[in-house]
Amino acid sequence: MTRPIKLSHDASDEDLLNAVRDWVRLLAAEEYEEALRYTYQDPYFEWTPDLIRDVIYGYGFPVLDEGDEVYKVTSLETAVETNGGLGPRAEVDFHMPRKHRISNTLIVAEIWFGLPLNGVWSDVTATFNVLFMEECVSLELQEIHVF
């Protein structure tokens, strides 16, 4: 895979969501360094492979207390709904393009994607900016936390 992911300028919503699904599969394989390299990074969020892992292990929080359950991303294909009916969530929200705060790149959309943790769909959500660049469209990881 190319790092970071590069999609064509005419990428569909489904193409964008499939790119996020590939990122989730990297997390399920606990390939946190690969997952980090799969997307662009805004230095503001200070993502590292260890921070991604710790936030997932802590259900959206980077700190685990002794005895806390450890959460891991699991298969998209086999995750089940929660007792409250929480199922898979994936949303691409296009908006007026805005200039990225630290580059000349345009942000044309945001993606919100619920993560399957320990076999169950969770309210831990990864958010991404969709970047429209001269040569391609790509993703920038924003946040991973409970929404």
Image (cartoon, rainbow, N blue to C red):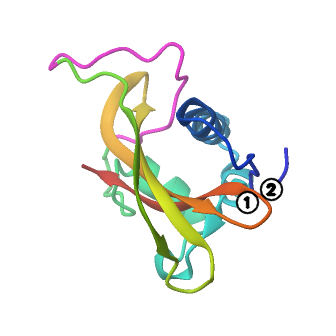
The question of residue 82 being in magenta is answered with yes
Q: Position of residue 107 (x, y in %)?
A: 51, 66
Q: Give the left or right position of residue 58, taking residue 45 as reference.
A: left
Q: Quadrant of residue 48?
A: bottom right
Q: Which quadrant would the N terminus be assigned to in this image?
A: top right
Q: Secondary structure at mark 2?
A: loop
Nearer-the-camera pick, 85 or 48: 85
Q: Position of residue 74 (x, y in %)?
A: 52, 28
Residue ID at (68%, 43%): 10
Residue under pointer 2: 3
Q: Position of residue 129 (x, y in %)?
A: 50, 60
The residue segment tinted magenta is: 69-84
Q: Main secondary structure of the magenta part?
A: loop
Residue under pointer 1: 37
Nearer-the-camera pick, 48 or 141: 141
Q: Amino acid at mark 1?
A: Arg
